[in-house]
Amino acid sequence: MNQYPAINLPKNIKLAIKREDLLHPHISGNKFRKLKYNILEAKKEGKELLLTFGGAFSNHIAATAAAGKEYGLKTIGIIRGEELANKISDNPTLAFANECGMEFKFISREEYRDKTIPDCIAKLRQEFGDFYLVPEGGTNSFAVKGCEEILTEEDAVFTHITCAVGTGGTISGLINTAKSHQKVLGFPALKADLSDDIRKFAKEENWELMPDYHFGGYAKVNEQLIVFINDFFEKTGVPLDPVYTGKALFGVMDLIDRDFFPENSNILFIHTGGLQGIAGMNKELSKKGLPIIKT
């Protein structure tokens, strides 16, 4: 198991990190898990083209492009924001995806909100041909099946399983495979309540969302978060991203300080990857005169 040795904390609490970010150099963490069975299904259906959606710094866009290159599939990325069309080379995520062979279609934010409407999908099929559709963020039943493989029998020693939450696929897989004595805690990266989305895939009630650690909303950061990420990296050598894992682990450590976890708790934190987004975030932080994130 790719796991950083346990960190000993007050009240005999232990914290270990499962390094899913080390699964693959470019198809990182939960994206590797989510794409695994989707790609197998695409090949089973005889599809040669993957089409998906994402924003300017999307981990999912980068991972899908890398997976397409590795497994011999063409990829199309429908990207939120028409203004990005002439800025590909300035954006580390889009530049990487482009190098992997992904073709882009940039659309307005208004169009992007309607991306799942059947008429919109039909128009995309007219434009690009017969593609295999991967949802934004990658979450569907095949993605959850992949995420169900994160936990192994070795992980039965833990009392709590913790992770960042984006679209709900990763935590759904963890909920489905957690042991009866384990509690799964999710730390949403955005303000929306994803409980209903999670319940589409996970029927157990062994979980809880901790909604107070999004730092103002999706992809929003402040100096407190950056200092935490950099301090943790200096102490442990484990890099965290500012959109997902940094916020989630900040939440875990804050809950420990607040005595949320009982004495003798053995906590497993799932490092879901997302480190590719640091380069783009650091460019934005530099513009604002804020400290950059260390890796």
Image (spheres, rainbow, N blue to C red):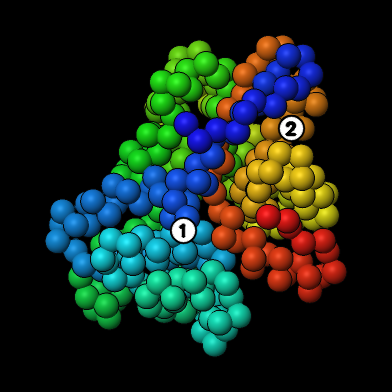
Does residue 44 lie above or below 92 as drawn? above
Upstream in sequence: badge 1 or badge 2: 1
Q: Report the front residue among 195 and 149.
A: 149
Which corner quadrant of the image does residue 15 belong to? top right
Does residue 139 lie above or below 291 as drawn? above
Task: Give the residue at x 40% y 39%.
Answer: 147
Q: Report the front residue among 24 and 267.
A: 24
Amino acid marked by disc 1: His
Task: Give the residue at x 46% y 58%.
Answer: 26
Q: Nearer the viewer, mark 1 or mark 2?
A: 1
Q: Is residue 280 left or right of residue 58?
A: right
Q: Position of residue 74 (x, y in %)?
A: 29, 71
Quickly name the residue at label 2: 253
Element type at marker 2?
helix
Does residue 291 lie above or below 163 as drawn? below
Task: Give the residue at x 33% y 38%.
Answer: 145
Q: Residue pushed farthest bottom?
A: 86
Q: Position of residue 43 (x, y in %)?
A: 19, 57
Label ID, residue 26: 1
Which corner quadrant of the image does residue 64 belong to? bottom left
Whole-angstrom CA distance, mark 1 to mark 2, is 28 Å
Q: Are marks 1 and 2 in contact (CB under 8 Å)?
A: no
Q: Quadrant of the C terminus?
A: bottom right
Amino acid marked by disc 2: Met
Q: Report the front residue among 266 and 50.
A: 266
Q: Is residue 201 left or right of residue 47?
A: right
Q: Please say whether residue 293 is visible from this viewpoint.
A: yes
Element type at marker 1?
loop
